Amino acid sequence: MSAQSDKHAVLCEKLKACDIRPTPQREVVLKVILEKRDHPTADEIFARVKASMPTISLATVYNCLETLVTCGLVRQVNLERAPTRYCPNLQEHAHFHDEVTGKVHDVELPGDFMDRLRTILPAGFDASTVELNFRGKAATN
């Protein structure tokens, strides 16, 4: 079995595990997000997908993204007043938004950090998700 058909099989299994029919459109959108961990916007994903599937519409890409987010295969990253970005990293982590380049980087957090962070919530509250974003620019020497 070739590496390409191995990737295809893995993508299909990920979708089937979520009870999602692995359509060619869903597969190519997920493949594009997983190939390059750069937190692309829907428009960037659309441009990348168009290269291999020229007939796909932007609406189809948005529908695929909604399905992939709903089934937990990718995460939405929302940075104030900026287009939604999509992240394939499903581990708990933070994001750093470089205000100069516009790029978004994953920030790995210490193992118990999220548990400790949840302890500061007001009594009687439990967070189902925590989104931690940093904004700034690369440090210069």
Image (cartoon, rainbow, N blue to C red):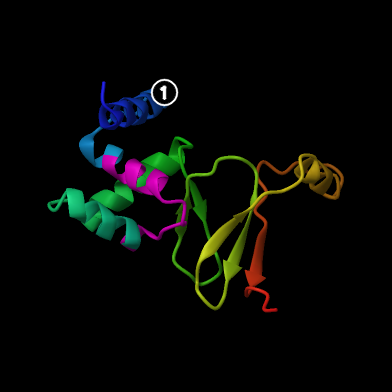
x, y (%) of residue 102? 50, 72
Give the residue drawn at x 45%, y 39%: 70
Give the residue drawn at x 37%, y 40%: 67
Q: Residues within 10 Å of mark 1 (few under 14, many from 20)?
A: few
x, y (%) of residue 7? 33, 31
Give the residue drawn at x 26%, y 27%: 5
Q: In which quarter of the image is residue 119?
A: top right
- Compared across the picture, whether 82 is left or right of 129 comes to left
x, y (%) of residue 124? 83, 42
Give the residue drawn at x 36%, y 27%: 10
The C terminus sits in image quarter: bottom right
Q: Residue furthest top?
A: 1
- Compared across the picture, whether 53 is left or right of 77 comes to left
Q: Which residue lies furthest to the front in this view?
A: 141
- Compared across the picture, whether 115 is left or right of 42 comes to right
Q: Which residue lies furthest to the left in this view?
A: 55
Query: Quick one: SS at disc 1?
Result: helix
Magenta-tinted stretch = 28-43
Which secondary structure class fits the magenta region best? helix
Using the image, determine if residue 90 lies above or below residue 83. above
Using the image, determine if residue 74 lies above or below residue 59. above
Using the image, determine if residue 6 lies above or below residue 104. above
In magenta stretch: residue 35: yes
- Nearer-the-camera pick, 60 or 94: 94
- Compared across the picture, whether 103 is left or right of 126 comes to left
The N terminus sits in image quarter: top left
Q: Mark 1 points at which residue?
A: 17
- Nearer-the-camera pick, 101 or 76: 101
Q: Which amino acid does label 1 sit on?
A: Ala
Using the image, determine if residue 136 lies above or below residue 104. below
x, y (%) of residue 85? 46, 58
